[in-house]
Amino acid sequence: MKTLLFTSEFPPFKGGVANYYGQLVNYWPIQEKLVILNNNKEELIRKSDFLPWWPAIGALKRKIAKNQIDYVLVGQILPLGTVAWFLSWFQSFRYAVFLHGMDLSFALRSGRKKLLANLILKRADKVICANSYVAEKVGQFYPATNGKISVVNPGIPAGAPPVDTKDLAEIETTYNLEGKTVLFSLGRLVKRKGVDQTIKALEEITAPIIDNLIYFIGGAGPREEYLRRLVPDRLAKKIIFLGELSEKEKWLWLKRSDIFIMPSRNIDGDFEGFGIVYLEANLSGKPVIAGNAGGVKDAVEDGYNGLLVDPEDPVSIKEALDKLISNKNLREKLGQQGQRRAIQEFNWEKQTAKLVSIITRSDF
């Protein structure tokens, strides 16, 4: 079966969705590699056009004919799903549609989009959801998809990359971390990520626990100034904004941290589709605290590799922090269990093999 990946987001484009498709290509488990049609050169979508996605019709038609494609993996339900749906009436191929989270929310925002999405999904051979939360929502809003829906979570590398001990020693000295419990967040600084709720939870933690705690926030975004203003004076030296981090710096801080925290929440359909960073923290042997919302529950199993909290309630977050800060043995247990789980269940080889099995209807 000759398969084409049809997507508007693909490396070097940044973001979790682009990385998902890039890794599918890298780990594709059959000899015949995926054919790729992406928008990196604006082949598919031109924002200046009246119908921005119109060029994608011709591009997909030519690619299918040239490569004798049997199956198309559609990366975005709107607008690329429209293109695949339209062409499928005139060319002989099957297609599967991927859904990650915000793409589904976007499709439900108007009656026209919801109707169009229904047509696309109804004709699709398979509907591949990046998390079980989205899979549940698709089944509720589009009953015709029941029986077609499968979940293929994002994957991760086989292990955390090594970090330089000299670099670890440098941040230890720079921030005077000896004997300190390090709390770490990483992500774009937007409301959904829950950094504000974490800061509010820290306000309620009293001495002596707060005396030995330092919270580092990695990332940048539109909420940064608001979050800086939210920090009370008495915690000014306890909450440190690191700004954007390189890949090397990310793994360095994950290694040095004691607890990773990101209590993401659902804000009007804007929710965490999965949260690969939770598994990256687990790969580094760290327990995580996560918001019980969106697709996070696929990444974080409460009480096994981390703790799930009510992301709208700082008290719930504080209680989880108290539990992990005061119990080093529990931190180590959850971190070790999470590391094994991440490697065994979420490696990319396993995820891509699962996808191939789904679309070929075979026991791959």
Image (spheres, helix red, strand yellow):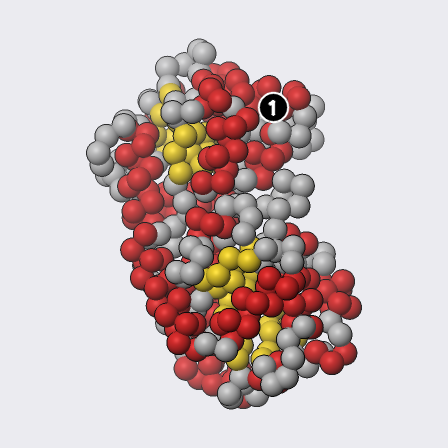
Horizontally, residue 216 falls left or right of residue 251, namely right
Query: Exactly how many numbered labels are in the figure?
Result: 1
* Residue found farthest to the left: 363
The residue sitting at 59% across, 55% down in the picture is: 310
Horizontally, residue 308 falls left or right of residue 224, namely left
Residue 200 x %, y %: 69, 67
Horizontally, residue 201 falls left or right of residue 9, namely right
Compared with 82, 36 (above or below) is below
Give 347 or 50, whichever is nearer the viewer.
347
The residue sitting at 55% across, 23% down in the picture is: 117
User: From this viewpoint, is residue 92 visible?
Assistant: yes
Compared with 200, 40 (above or below) is above
User: From this viewpoint, is residue 14 visible?
Assistant: no
Residue 54 x %, y %: 59, 22
Horizontally, residue 233 falls left or right of residue 112, namely right
Residue 169 x %, y %: 47, 85
Q: Quadrant of the N terminus?
A: top left
The residue sitting at 41% across, 72% down in the picture is: 330
Helix, strand or loop for disc 1: helix
Give 200 or 280, whichever is nearer the viewer.
200
Compared with 248, 293 (above or below) is above
Give 37 or 339, whichever is nearer the viewer.
339
The amino acid beneath tag 1 is: Lys
Q: In which quarter of the image is residue 219?
A: bottom right
Q: In which quarter of the image is residue 82?
A: top right
Per the image, the residue denoted by label 1 is: 114
Compared with 68, 155 (above or below) is below
